[in-house]
Image: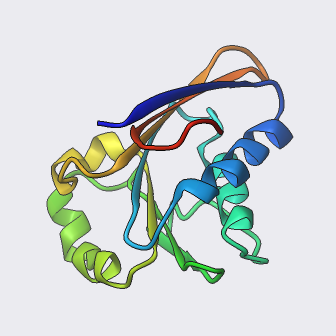
């Protein structure tokens, strides 16, 4: 499965910086499955990830639009599956088309669409340990540190 990395952050800014550093491990076609409770910092992590991929765009949660696209050195497709009930709904909105576009697909609320993943995804879990403290665990890639 590759290495598992764990990182502690103590502010929103540190969570964003973790995402920015994490971007160096991503290549075209990578899928990142994000897990974490409401308010854990998933969107903050994606903000940093987008910055790390060279995007200048303002990153917001795509809860109502389902997917936001950001241009950078690699295109970033930011999905929010909070309102979806199954992987079938993800396929209905064109999941396979996004995968074929050779960008990075980051999926918040991945637990709602587990059947859409083929086992090659990178899993990132963000655990809320306190008001600002987070534990970020990443698995499924060959990087050495984030």
Residue 58 at x, y percent in the picture: 76, 71
Rendered image quadrant of residue 74: bottom right
Residue that protrudes farthest toward the top in the picture:
129
Rendered image quadrant of residue 7: top right
Q: Residue at x 45, y 76 (%)?
A: 103
Q: Is residue 90 left or right of residue 82?
A: left
- Is 136 situated above or below 116? above
Colour pattern of the rendering: rainbow
State the residue in front, 123 or 84: 123
Q: Is residue 21 left or right of residue 113?
A: right
Exactly how many numbered labels are in the figure? 0
Residue 80 at x, y percent in the picture: 45, 58
State the residue in front, 126 or 119: 119
Q: Is residue 79 left or right of residue 74?
A: left
- Is 3 situated above or below 80? above
Rendered image quadrant of residue 39: top right
Q: The N terminus is located in which quarter?
A: top left
- Is 20 situated above or below 124? below
Residue 84 at x, y percent in the picture: 30, 56
- Is 141 situated above or below 72? above
Q: The C terminus is located in which quarter?
A: top right
Q: Residue at x 81, y 24 (%)?
A: 10
Residue 135 at x, y percent in the picture: 62, 22
Q: Residue at x 75, y 20 (%)?
A: 133
Q: Residue at x 22, y 45 (%)?
A: 114
Q: Is residue 129 left or right of residue 125?
A: right
């Amino acid at each position: 499965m590759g290495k598992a990395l764990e990182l502690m952050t103590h502010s929103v800014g540190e969570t964003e910086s973790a995402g920015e550093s994490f971007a160096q491990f991503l290549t075209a076609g990578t899928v990142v499955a994000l897990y974490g409770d409401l308010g854990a910092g998933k969107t903050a992590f994606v903000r940093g990830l987008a910055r790390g991929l060279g995007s200048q765009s303002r990153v917001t949660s795509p809860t109502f639009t389902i997917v936001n696209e950001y241009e950078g050195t690699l295109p970033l497709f930011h999905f929010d599956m909070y309102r979806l009930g199954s992987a079938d709904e993800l396929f209905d909105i064109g999941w396979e088309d996004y995968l074929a576009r050779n960008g990075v697909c980051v999926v918040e609320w991945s637990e709602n669409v587990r059947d859409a993943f083929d086992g090659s995804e990178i899993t990132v879990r963000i655990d809320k340990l306190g008001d600002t403290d987070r534990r970020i665990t990443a698995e499924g890639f060959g990087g050495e540190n984030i």
